[in-house]
Image (cartoon, rainbow, N blue to C red):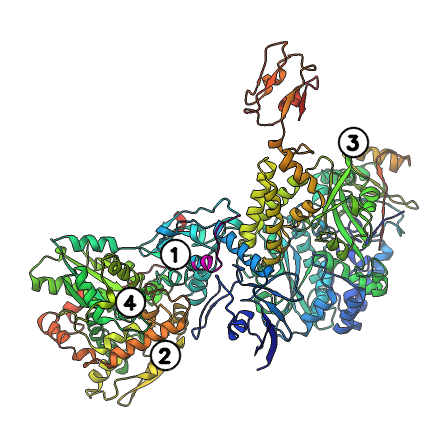
Amino acid sequence: MAKQIRIALRNCGVIDPERIEDYIARDGYMALASVLTDLSPEAVIEILKKSGLRGRGGGGFPAGIKWEITRNVVADQKYVVCNADEGDPGAFMDRSILEGDPHVVLEAMTINGYCTGASRGLIYIRAEYPLAVERLKTAMGQSRSMGLLGENILGTGFNFDIDIRYGAGAFVCGEETALIHSMEGLRGEPTVKPPFPSVEGYLKKPTNVNNVETFANIPIIINKGWKWFSSIGTEKSKGTKVFALAGKINNVGLIEVPMGTTLREVIYEIGGGIQYGKAFKAAQTGGPSGGCLTVKHLDTPIDYDNLIAAGSMMGSGGLIVMDEDDCMVAIAKFYLEFTVEESCGKCSPCRIGNKRLFELLEKITQGNGTMDDIDKLRNLGTVIKETSLCGLGQSSPNPVLSTIDNFPEEYHEHVTGKKCRSKVCKSLMQYLVVADKCIGCTLCARNCPVDAISGERKQVHFIDQSKCIKCGACMDKCKFNAIIIN
Amino acid sequence: MAKLETANALMELREALKEKGAALSQANSPLSTIQVKVTMATCGIASGSKPVFEFMKDELSKRNIPAKVTQVGCMGFCYAEPTIEITIPGKSPVIFGYVNLKKADEIIEHFIRKGEEIEGSIQINYETA
Amino acid sequence: MNMVKLIIDGKHVEVPENTTLLKAAKTVGIDIPTLCYFELKDMNIENRPGGCRVCVVEVRGRRNLAPACNTMVAEGMEVFTHNIRVLNARRTVLELILSDHPAECLTCSKNGNCELQSMAQQLGVREIPYAGEQSKYRKDTSPAIIRDVDKCIMCRRCEMMCNDVQTVGALSAVNRGFMAVVAPAFEMNLEKSTCTYCGQCVSVCPTGALTEVDHSRNVINSLADPAKTVVVQTAPAVRAALGEEFGLEPGTLVTGKMVAALRRLGFDYVFDTDFAADLTIMEEGSELLDRLTRYLKGDKEVKLPILTSCCPGWVNFFEHNFPEMLDIPSTAKSPQQMFGPVAKEYFAKKLGIDRKNMIVVSIMPCLAKKYECQREEFKVNGDPDVNYSLSTRELAHLIKQSNIDFNALPEEDFDNPLGASTGAAVIFGATGGVIEAACRTAYELYTGKKLEKVDFTELRGLENIRHATLDFDGLPINIGIAHGLGNARKLLEDIRAGKSQFHAIEIMACPGGCIGGGGQPYHHGNSEIIKQRSAAIYREDSGKPIRKSHENPFIQELYREFLGKPLGEKSHHLLHTHYFDKSVGDFIEE
């Protein structure tokens, strides 16, 4: 039984992305043709609104309403922007779509231009995606030469063209106001909304910003109708969602499931279960902005609202699976390290607060934490969320807060027992020699990079904990399983 | 490609392309030739799909097996890259994972030429809209 | 204008739409604390990046707290500015900012004048629970400004001033996250950047991240050296602001007390830059007339408009940005730099001392003056015409540390001959003043008639760019005035495009002119202070017995005894300068 329905990915793996003929044979540009010849912009927006399509970049804002807002602003120039600044660690949905089906994004952006009254589109894409860029450029050249992009599209008198802008690798530039400033040549940092880009965006003109995956859903909704689309998914989250499945799971890959699919189905049926038969511990959705879902969420249908209720978020679609070997405190620290690095530094809670969260987590994972530190994490995390300027800071404490909520015992163990049950936090570990297994072969001592192991030949060896750097070389070398982690 | 002056011209082109079987979903292949699709997204290329793509093109032609070899985007089986999909006329498409040149050779000789079942196929677990 | 009704802390408020919560709250006496927010009312200067997050408030129905400085009122909104959630969040945000700020208040030059310090005091912060690593940067000292950005709180006021108001573009945010800070491009030294040393960044910095280079220690040493004759000159804008440092109302004129204080500090001669300002008018006014007359005669070589050149920030700006127009500004030196050679080449000789044994100190409302007096072309065999330039603030410190009760001082007069001045010189301190002073003289020299109405009120005010046409006895003279370098840039670009209709343009780098200079007492965003200083300047002018530079008897004497005539050979040598193309940045080599 197929648990997956490929809508956004429908052409990926099917067509040659460098041949426009393949795309056309799969009904490509038919939606654009019917929109330009048969439908008013209002009618198209109505279809989108009825379809229930929500933004796939993470926010989940209804796409039709966004288009309508942009349409209703009176301006001499408007812009359509495709956000392809995919920055979540472990997420590659947008790249796959752009590499596998570039025309769908061009077609959808052109439809968006027709609906909002924009004549120019911009794709903001990471410079680290050279193949996607190359295929986009090829696609743009083809569609221009066939009259599907540029002046007088399909003889209808409608003009629309697209340019590419490159991101320089800043996570925050996925935030739409920061993205716009970056495109303007300014420092990529967000500004307070409102004004929303739909009202005042690129070069102060109304700008409709949608994510790659959102655009990839548009043509087929027009071709197959809103009823078809809205029949898939849950009440408030329609259609499908692409996830980049990663972590301790057997079938790492790109999946597209109907909204409402449970985590259990994703992990065990599509993902093939946890690697090496280990126990599932948590799944992180929403990347560094999201939270973790645990065993108790396995049967929760995945949609925008349920994920928020579970203390996480849909995010752009990264889904990282963790097993019993993952330390949740270390996981929280990993994500914080990322946000500390990627904060633009504009607002104080995000610039300094995330740093302090990271420092507290480091203190805890090094065995120096106190119960007071856990309270500090919680309080500080809450303040950062509610006072930060943009979505980055408003969500960056989520990994900490949700791991504290879901795995309080792991935090407590680190603090009071100075113990990391997953044996990840090195400062809390001790490599010890098991006396009755050690035969005194000296192999461990010879391989220790810091000379922490002493012992005579054929005598039980001893590890000096003050010298040990916990590299694990001794354990790897020992042929008698005589070295254990305490 | 010539410029399309009207929406009708686009539709006519689509029909013509469909008849020629320019690009096909797995289910509705009217082609009489064998189709080979090699995933050539960044992930596939990084795992070595480029030589596999060249190998399939060159070897099928050298071995006189009429086939259409195309590059495609991501099929979603990242864990098993490089992946290739083979559609033999009249049969359901089959996807193979972890394809290196040795595997590619086995696919040509055993799966395509001799029609034998071979190991390493991946269950297709999705519908395509 | 549509009015919006809302409730703030239980109070009903009605304000025009597009009003921020911050301003709406103010109308009902609720003062929401702010840190990054900055406004100079009526001068089109506003900074609200929404970055510090100290002004957050709760808006009913919103998930997160909202920055009051950046949230517009909406009908029916219900806002809480000091409930427990808001107070906790605000305090935590401030504690975070303090956790990344060096706790060296006692030795910080902004001690007592720091907005972060006041905020910590206001919110009653007694400890910093989130102590951790502090960001560290290289300290950067330029001829005029010190950047000690360990103390930067990323309020971005300086950036706004440097980019939006001044269009200098020397400062902007660099780096990301915890290491984000405001700096010149590539974190190069300010000296290598296009900085004009206008000092507006310093005047708006809430902390001690940007301060002036302090030369008061050098001055103290000079005063203590019996071999030196130490002469001081005071710029017109200083007397209108110095009193603020001693608790006097903004706009209090303290000319006499300032003179008395300088005498008690030990200066041998207390002179006035105003004298040199009168001299500037003689030279610059003559140059204007010369160019105008030749222009009217059809001389195609002559360039108009003529631009004033007494503002060193402005000189730096056009040297950086308009190198192809270096022949347009007047060649007249600034009053500070005219004073120097007059003191060292004329007055020193009168006293019979070597110029090397005379130390000239200037008291300026300005930081660019510190750089100006260090320029090579203003030195003779390595001896600067003006040795040290102190800001108004530094003078105040000097007075305070010398145990002088400023407010109890008697009013005293400047020494002669370089202390006598006219009303025309005093108004150099306010935007429009230089050109007004020049016109008072130029009118009489050009028409040969007596100017009855001395006040050209049409040239005064605080609008960004002003223009007026004066009647020189039938000849219409078009005058343009800009204060703030961004406004200057607009006039300059018009000239470059051949669209300028002006005969003469006055430009001052600082908003408001010298009274709003980078070396003045901190106004903390209160534009009323700048207006009061301006009013004081014009009050001083109207109270002066002589109000036209060419009528200054000591100026007349100087020309008789020493200089000969305006634009004469000696003037040319001592009182005029030339400009340099500084457009080619050499920062790459760093």
| Residue annotated with mark 3 | B102
Q: Secondary structure at mark 3?
A: helix
Q: Is residue C52 left or right of residue A474?
A: left
**From which residue to which does the magenta span run?**
C118-129
Q: Is residue C128 magenta?
A: yes
C98 shown above or below A197 = above
> Residue at point 54% right, 24% down?
A467
> Where is residue C464 drawn, in percent x and y?
40, 75
| Residue annotated with mark 1 | C210
Alpha-carbon distance for marks 3 and 1?
A: 68 Å
Q: Amino acid at mark 2?
A: Gly
Chain identity of mark 3:
B
**Upstream in the sequence, badge 1 or badge 4?**
1
> Where is residue C556 drawn, in percent x and y?
13, 76
Alpha-carbon distance for marks 2 and 4?
A: 22 Å
Q: Name the one closer to the observer, A272 or C380.
A: A272
Closer to us: mark 3 or mark 1? 1
Q: Secondary structure at mark 2?
A: loop
Q: Residues within 10 Å of mark 2 (few under 14, many from 20)?
A: some
Q: Is residue C495 left or right of residue A444?
A: left
Alpha-carbon distance for marks 1 and 4?
A: 21 Å
| Residue annotated with mark 2 | C461
Chain identity of mark 2:
C
Alpha-carbon distance for marks 2 and 3?
A: 85 Å
Chain identity of mark 4:
C
> Residue at point 60% right, 27% down?
A470
| Residue annotated with mark 4 | C242
Q: Is residue C453 magenta?
A: no
Q: Is residue A390 visible?
A: no
